[in-house]
Image (cartoon, coloured by chain):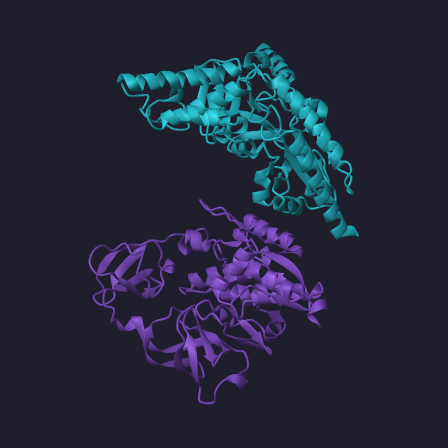
Amino acid sequence: MTKQNATVFLGMSGGVDSSVSAILLKEQGYKVVGVYMKNWSKDLPGMKCPWAEDLADAKRVAVKLGIDFMVFDFEKEYKQKVVDYMLGEFQAGRTPNPDIMCNEEIKFKLFFEEALKRGADYIATGHYAKSENGKLKLAKDDNKDQTYFLYRISKEAVEKTLFPLAELKKPEVKQIAAKHNLANAYKKESMGVCFVGDVGMKDFLREYIDLKPGEIRDADTEEVLGYHDGAVFYTIGQRHGLYVGGGLPYYVVKKDLKNNIVYVSKNLNNEELWTKEIVLESIFLRDPADLPKDGNILIRLRHRAPLVPATFKKDRVILGEEVKTIAAGQSVVFYHDDICLGGGIVKS
Amino acid sequence: MIYLDHAAATPVSDKVLKAMKPFMTDDFFNPSSAYLPAARVRGMYEDAKNKIANFIGAKGNDLVITSGATEANMLACTAVSKTGKILVLETEHASVLENVKKYKYSTVKADKTGLINLTDLKAKLTDDVELVSVSLANNELGTIQPLAEISQILKEVRLSRLKKGITTQLLLHSDASQGLALIELNVARLGVDLMTLNAAKVCGPKGVGALYVGHGVRLNPVSMGGGQERGLRAGTENIAGVVGFATAIDAVKGHSTAARKKYTTLVKSLKSELEKAKVEPIFLGTPKHQLANFLPVSFPGLDAERLIFMLEEKEVYVSTGAACSASKGEPSHVLRAIGLSSKEIAGSLRISLGVLNNESNVKEAGKIIREVVDKEYARLYD
């Protein structure tokens, strides 16, 4: 199939990355169909969901480029697969990553399937990532690389996904936008539950989870230092938002969800804050054949964190040196060379 | 740029700007202060309020200055008691429709042209209705409502209530944000008890509005404090804004007939240009009861939002339905209320002329809109 008669359904959020992706795909000769995924439209108190403005921005770009444009409504599915999962995880005392879930369940599943059904040969998104011979690989811009969020997407989807920004750095993307007079695309980057960035996760959670006051205790002495309004709102390693005044900062080191107690420590060397071994569950290996026999790989512990060497063994990764504890529910993503091997979710 | 969206916003004239400036610099005083310069400012503020009020046949003291029409509409609703009910025309602006939701309310139907259905109004005027809210002219269609007729109906209901021994109040509120420059208004003659005014639609500054409050109408304060605006809206007066509003009113006063004539001609020429498009336009509303500067039009089968983005490339600015609907992502409730199909709603533009328009740029705009419509038609059907 030549590019001239291949149809690409491109997810368009109204932001600069997907807008520039549209330009690039069109220049490469694809027949591009822009799709806005309507995943969420609910307003929160004091926070109007900007979905309609985002949709208008995406559509404006599509009209400007003369490409077809449509809206896929995944609101029901997003609530079920992403938001409900996220709430359940927080209520279980864990710290989930909704963006990873959104990519796995919505963008590279529902959107992918719907696009193929409507005649797409490929799908595309404005993620910084690379798809090559069915492998998910690091993007050229290692500062923007988003494979951390994509490690769980299906192999079938990767085979039919184009990442037009794979070989570009963010400043180049901005230049292309400017050259095409897409000044309106210079806005905040879109994320899964995009508004959460604006109001904060806690404000979002409070819509669904009741406040429940409890004690903040010193992890070493059990002394009651203060009170919190719900242990589920706190994450291990978190430093801010504790109603404990003065002196060195306190870090959350432990949560007793049953008794609604948050344990904190001023001691940065507290053993709960550091780890050399991370036990994982829901491990997803993209292609076991790519995994080095000795298990020596690189891992990424959060988006944009540096790649660090580790050994993968059965259900855990063992690091060469201690790292800050990763909260249960977060993801550890595996790499070898430039290939994203998959990853797993930190076990409680 | 050719701007065809005067129902959304208007430019502040140099004269207005000049009149406002001293109150932000030399005459910055708080009018509540006791010394002379402050008292002088107080006087100028009262003068400006008088000017605005006189324009609708009222006195300065009858006005409560607000931050715009939305707040004025909200304040008007407070006239209703806990047990009272509001009747509101279903095509009202969101600032009315959303605010009445805090009270008991019902909606009154509009006909195909957007005019209030008076039979429906009469049928819904039960004894618990305390307030009826109908705009002077609709903000999407420009439909001018028969306020005098409505107030006559209310007068009769008041009489019949008294005969039955019922003393429940029955007030008429009208949001006159649109059409202030084109219709001579007199609150007493119209029989309106509450009227919302908006500076931003008549080349005054944004963020300034007023509620005319007739005698005997009791409202609940929106803010308490220093007792300004009859104690209904405490807070230091927006003197520059009110002076700007008054100056803007000065500029339109006495010119409504000429303005109507100008816009009638311009709209006519625009219409004849649009009629040549490959998609036959449906002109919404009826010229007989429509603001002279309004031209709401639907190109069924086309996507108005696409048209707006294409027009924006050519620096022609129009609106789809209400600007507010576009950002809400919902089809216009007004166009639904007047019975348009989804296809007709999707293809609807609101063109509203004003001070920035003349014969030549309206002609040019007509040509550009027609070209864009034809281009979209070709994309879809050729």
Q: Colour of chain A?
A: purple
Q: Residue at x 27, y 73 (%)?
A: A271
User: Left or right: B31 with respect to A303?
Assistant: left
A207 in relation to A11, above or below: above
Q: Residue at x 71, y 63 (%)?
A: A118
B304 vs A191, nearest the viewer: B304
Q: Which residue is drawn at 45% across and 55% down?
A: A196
B104 vs A2, nearest the viewer: A2
Q: Is residue A122 visible?
A: yes
The quadrant the N terminus of chain A occupies is: bottom right
Kindly indicate the quadrant of the structure image that contains residue B43.
top left
Q: Is residue B121 visible?
A: no
User: Left or right: A87 with respect to B42?
Assistant: right
**Chain painted cyan:** B
Q: Position of residue B359 (x, y in %)?
A: 67, 29
User: Left or right: B72 with respect to A271?
Assistant: right
Q: Which residue is drawn at 45% across and 71% down?
A: A142
* Farthest residue, direction bottom: A293
Q: Position of residue A49 (x, y in %)?
A: 51, 49
